[in-house]
C-alpha cells in the first residue's frame, strides 16, 4: 500500500531545482501527485511543496538521508512529512468562543488535519465544552503580576502535550516578546481586519459609526510586533448602511472563524512558508479539504 508524503523546500533560486527534486523522487520509487513552486525574484528565494506517493516502500528516514546530497548541492532547507500524521495543536481562548467551537467541530469531522491536544483559557467559560470533547482543559489566569509564571505554565502545557502549533482563537492577552520569539512561526492569531484603524474596544461599533462597507478578518503568525506578523489568510464580507453594529459583530464572527480555519489548514498541510515579513501560501492539494464524515 502506497504511503502519502509531502516534501517542502526553501533555497536560493537557481536552475535545476525542480528537475533535481523530481528526479530524486522518481529514482526512489515515488510518484508526484501535486506540486507547487514559487520563485521570489525580489529576494532570490525559491519555495516548493510536493505531495507524492511512495509506491515501492520507501520510508521517511531513508528518503531524508538520501535527499541530503541534493539539499547540499542547492543549499536547501527541507523537510519530509507523513500526510497521515495529524499536527498536534494547543488552542488558547478567552471569552469569545466562536472560533473555538468552529475548530472543535472541524476537528471532530476530520476537516482539519490536526489533533487538539489541549485548550488553555484565562477564564472557565468553555471548560465544559472542551472536557465534553475529551480534550484537556487548562485555566491559567493572567495578571500583570503573574504574567511570567502564567506563560511558563502555558509553555509547560505545550511541551508536555508535544504541540507543534499554538492557535490564538480570540485569546485576549498579549504574549511576551520572549514567548513570541521562542514559538516563532508556530503561533497563529485571528483578528478583525480594521487594523491599524479602529483599535481598542468595540471595533465593529467604531466601524459602524464610520459607515464602513467591508468587514474582514486576518489570520497571521504572531510576532513581537502586535498584530503585524506575516499574514496567512484574509477574507471580507460586504455590509450596508441598513445593518446595525450587532449585524457587524455577527458577520465578523463568521468570517473570523472561516479565515482562522483556512489558515490552520494551510499551516497543517505545510503549505505556508515564511518569506521575510510575508508568507508564501500554496494552493491546497486535491482532496485535502475532504472530511472523514459530514457531521
Image (tube, rainbow, N blue to C red):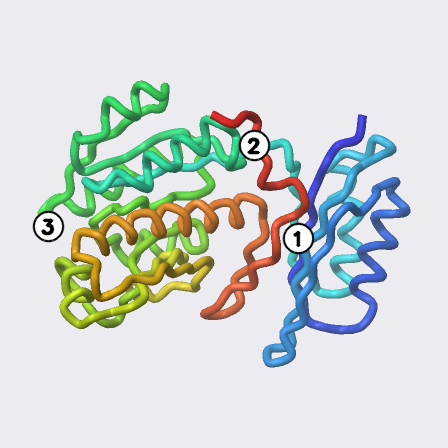
Which dot marks residue 8? 1
Separation of marks 3 and 1 at Cα, in angstroms? 41 Å
Residue at screen point 51% across, 49% down: 267
Q: Residue at x 25, y 29 (%)?
A: 138
Counting residues from the start of the chain, the first of labels 2 and 1 encountered is: 1
Q: Report the mark closest to the observer, 2 or 1.
A: 2
Choose mark 3 or mark 1, whichever is in front: 1
Image marks 2 and 3: residues in contact by CB distance under 8 Å: no
Q: Circle 3 — which element? A: loop
- Looking at the image, is mark 3 or mark 1 earlier in the sequence? 1
- Mark 2 → mark 3, Cα distance in angstroms: 42 Å
Quadrant hosting residue 61: top right
Residue 263 location (% of width, % of height): 46, 51
Reading the image, the residue beneath label 2 is 291
Q: Nearer the viewer, residue 271 or 241?
A: 241
Q: Which residue is located at x 59 percent, y 32 percent? A: 85
Residue placed most toward the observer, 153 or 54: 54
What's the distance in space between the residues labelled 2 and 1, CA to CA?
24 Å
Mark 1 crowdedness (10 Å alpha carbons): few <14, some 14-19, many ≥20: many
What residue did someone put label 3 on? 144
Residue 1 in the image: above or below residue 195: above
Please state if 77 lies on the left or on the right of 262 as rendered.
Answer: right
x 29%, y 53%: residue: 252
Amino acid at each position: 500500500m502506497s504511503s502519502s508524503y509531502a516534501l517542502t523546500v526553501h533555497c536560493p533560486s537557481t536552475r535545476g531545482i525542480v528537475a533535481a527534486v523530481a528526479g530524486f523522487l522518481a529514482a526512489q520509487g515515488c510518484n508526484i501527485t501535486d506540486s507547487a513552486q514559487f520563485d521570489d525574484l525580489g529576494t532570490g528565494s525559491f519555495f516548493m511543496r510536493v505531495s507524492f506517493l511512495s509506491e515501492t516502500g520507501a520510508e521517511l528516514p531513508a528518503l531524508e538521508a538520501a535527499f541530503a546530497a541534493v539539499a547540499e548541492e542547492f543549499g536547501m532547507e527541507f523537510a519530509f512529512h507523513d500526510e497521515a500524521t495529524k499536527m498536534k495543536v494547543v488552542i488558547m481562548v478567552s471569552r469569545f468562543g466562536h472560533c473555538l467551537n468552529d475548530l472543535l467541530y472541524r476537528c471532530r469531522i476530520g476537516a482539519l488535519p490536526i489533533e487538539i491536544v489541549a485548550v488553555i483559557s484565562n477564564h472557565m467559560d468553555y471548560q465544559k465544552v472542551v472536557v465534553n470533547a475529551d480534550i484537556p482543559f487548562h485555566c491559567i489566569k493572567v495578571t500583570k503580576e503573574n504574567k511570567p509564571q502564567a506563560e511558563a505554565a502555558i509553555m509547560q502545557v505545550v511541551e508536555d502535550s508535544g504541540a507543534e502549533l499554538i492557535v490564538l482563537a480570540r485569546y485576549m492577552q498579549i504574549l511576551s516578546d520572549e514567548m513570541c520569539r521562542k514559538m516563532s512561526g508556530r503561533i497563529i492569531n485571528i483578528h478583525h481586519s480594521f487594523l491599524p484603524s479602529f483599535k481598542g474596544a468595540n471595533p465593529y461599533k467604531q466601524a459602524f459609526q464610520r459607515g464602513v462597507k467591508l468587514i474582514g478578518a486576518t489570520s497571521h503568525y504572531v510576532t513581537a510586533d502586535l498584530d503585524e506578523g506575516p499574514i496567512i489568510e484574509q477574507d471580507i464580507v460586504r455590509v450596508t448602511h441598513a445593518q446595525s453594529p450587532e449585524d457587524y459583530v455577527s458577520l465578523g464572527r463568521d468570517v473570523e472563524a472561516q479565515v482562522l480555519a483556512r489558515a490552520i489548514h494551510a499551516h497543517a498541510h505545510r503549505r505556508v512558508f515564511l518569506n521575510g515579513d510575508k508568507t508564501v501560501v500554496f494552493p491546497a492539494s486535491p482532496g485535502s479539504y475532504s472530511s472523514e464524515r459530514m457531521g
